[in-house]
Image (cartoon, helix red, strand yellow):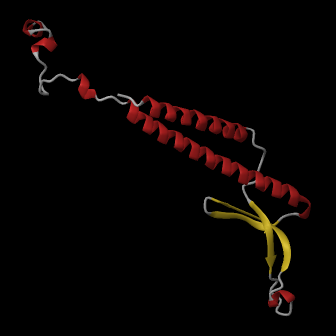
Amino acid sequence: MHNNEELSKIVQKIHQLNKTRYAILKQILHSPGYIAAQVYERYKKCGNKNCKCANGELHGPFMWIYQKKKGQKILSTTVQKELVIKAKKLSGNYQSWTQKRQRLRELEQEIQDLLNEMETYLEQDAKEFATTRKAGRPGKEMLGGKENVEHQ
């Protein structure tokens, strides 16, 4: 017998998660462009032994762009001054994109987990439909009688 109250709660949770999932998916589908890179401030030493940076007062800040794909560094350099604002925005768009994708994966997993739970309430025991005979050859009554078997 089903626990209808528990089943109803699961269905409601799935509906709510799916609404949230759809809202995030809608945002993803209308995402602005991005650059798959980090843009951040960086301070550096110049290497001159007589420079202030040799005593810890580093040069900078410099806006830096860093990109790594499939474990390989592709880009690591300063950002063109006239493009800093745009680079920061596009990098932020990428962070937003990846966060939404991760949240979408989490929601989909939650829905799958609830469906697995729901399955335990819906599944009925197949033994209820089995005969009480031992497994093996079917009886005459299941084949339509002995004469039916001989004519086949």
Q: Name the side, left or right, on which 17 lies relative to 43.
A: left
**Where residue 44 sits: x, y (%)?**
80, 79
Q: Name the side, left or right, on which 102 lies relative to 111.
A: right
Instruction: State whether residue 93 is above or below residue 9.
Output: below
Instruction: State whether residue 137 is above or below residue 87.
Output: above
- Quadrant where the C terminus lies? top left
Q: Name the side, left or right, on which 107 lies relative to 82.
A: left
Residue at point 87%, 63% (across, down): 80
Q: Considering depth in this image, is 67 or 40 the residue closer to the camera? A: 40
**Where residue 139 sits: x, y (%)?**
11, 17
- Quadrant where the N terminus lies? top left
Q: Quadrant of residue 42?
A: bottom right
Q: Considering depth in this image, is 135 or 20 the residue closer to the camera? A: 20
Residue at point 27%, 27% (across, down): 126
**Where residue 22 sits: x, y (%)?**
65, 35
**Where residue 94 sits: x, y (%)?**
73, 52
Residue at point 61%, 44% (across, down): 104
Q: Quadrant of residue 70?
A: bottom right
